[in-house]
Amino acid sequence: MKITFMGAGSTVFARNVIGDCMCCEALRDSVFALYDIDGGRLEESRTILEAMRKTMGGYGKIECYLGVENRKEALRGASFVVNAIQVGLYDPCTIIDFEVPKKYGLRQTIADTLGIGGIMRGLRTIPVMADFAADMAEVCPDALFLNYTNPMAMLSGYMQRYTPIQTVGLCHSVQVCSEDLLRQLGMEDKIEGRKELIAGINHMAWLLELKDKDGNDLYPAIKAKMDEKIADPNCYNKVRFDYVRRFGYYCTESSEHNGEYNMFYIKDKYPELIEKFNIPLDEYPRRCVAQIEGWKNEYQQLLKDGVKQHTRTHEYASHIMESVVTGKPMQIGGNVLNKGHLITNLPEDACVEVPCLVNGKGVHPCHVGPLPVQCAAMNMTNINVQLLTIEAARTLKKEHIYQAAMLDPHTGSELDLDTIVKMVDDLIEAHGDYLPKYH
């Protein structure tokens, strides 16, 4: 069996996912094909993973494929393809995504999922994903594509609507959402045996139900703690807690993410909200710089001390592969097309995050029904942007980029329409060849 990892220069993540596979008896004898366009980063990944493979019993085989000219061979015959690419990297593209909007007074926190930064990241990544899909259709048409790259809903939604490739989008936040919430609130005794339902869209899926092992609803106790937590100056999760106060439900992704998915918290006319809700402006660039430096140090330490035994993580990828290979069923939170109205009050062409059953036949999304009206309304403000960004990538019409930016909740609440158009034009020019030509 062959497992291909696209963007294998993301060494820490490749180490986790492939290391997880090496921990699984059903997967460990696989050929692990590493693909990247950066030779230096690919070699770092090969070095670490080869050392890990030997440490963990010497099972399987690692192959490396460098550059677009070798991409098709990297994919040929794969049963599973894991995607973790970042088109344009931190430098120059993430820097552009933050610095150009800043000239227009538009501030961001993460800029990888929504907002003008998420739109631009989607536009430069979808063409690459389309190329992946074309190659896969030729050399591994039955492979399951596991997408980890953001903007999740835009990229997975494009793959699901406009390519023949079986695709599921996977996030890190669903499986830790309720446990993390209970720990923050000092309710650790309610973790074991809890029952939950999470549904919505990526990074804004809603914890619709949370019950303890005896079936008691935990939301009354959770809501009773919200005012106290939001008043705490050291609380880092105030946006999500404010969602509970204002909309009734907790959501899956962090407050630094959700601070920019709406028109509420980052407002030029209300600068005091930044401090009140602990909004970390420019958080992602700081994080990127720290991660790049941290990996340099970690890599040198690994070369010096050797690679230690890997412990299987909570990432879904290896567990999905194991379930498909062995037929042993499991449940995940997956990003899938809302075909058949899995969530009845969201559109069918939206990419939604819902419970999915996995078995030997693949990934099977579960019907959820309607979201609470206010939760569906919040999701729709994001879905509008996602669908228009996909349309822009599909048609290469610049007007759809403008429209996506205009309808983005944060962008549209801060800038007038003419300024939005100027900002988009500046971003397109700054990104240069990282984007196709729009008309």
Image: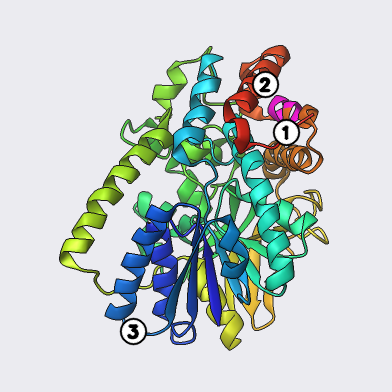
Q: Secondary structure at mark 3?
A: loop
User: Is 201 located above or below residue 363 in the figure?
Assistant: above
Q: What secondary structure is the stretch in magenta mostly built from?
A: helix
Q: Amino acid at mark 1?
A: Lys
Which portion, as a residue range, is magenta? 402-407
Mark 1 vs mark 2: in front: 1
Which of the two residues, 166 or 190, is positioned nearer the viewer here? Answer: 166
Contact, mark 2 vs mark 3 (Cβ under 8 Å): no
Identify the residue under disc 1. Answer: 437
Cα separation between marks 1 and 2: 12 Å
Q: Does the segment drawn in magenta span residue 403?
A: yes
Q: Amino acid at mark 3?
A: Gly
- Residue 380, position as x, y percentages in the image: 73, 40
Q: Position of residue 308 (x, y in %)?
A: 24, 71
Residue kind at label 2, given as amino acid type:
Asp
Q: Secondary structure at mark 2?
A: helix
- Decide if residue 349 is on the left or right side of residue 235: right
Give the residue drawn at x 46%, y 72%. Answer: 63
**Where, quadrant-wise, is the C terminus in this rendering?**
top right
State the image coordinates of residue 177 (x, y, percent, origin top left): 48, 55
Q: Which residue is mark 2?
A: 425
Q: CA distance from mark 2 to mark 3?
A: 52 Å
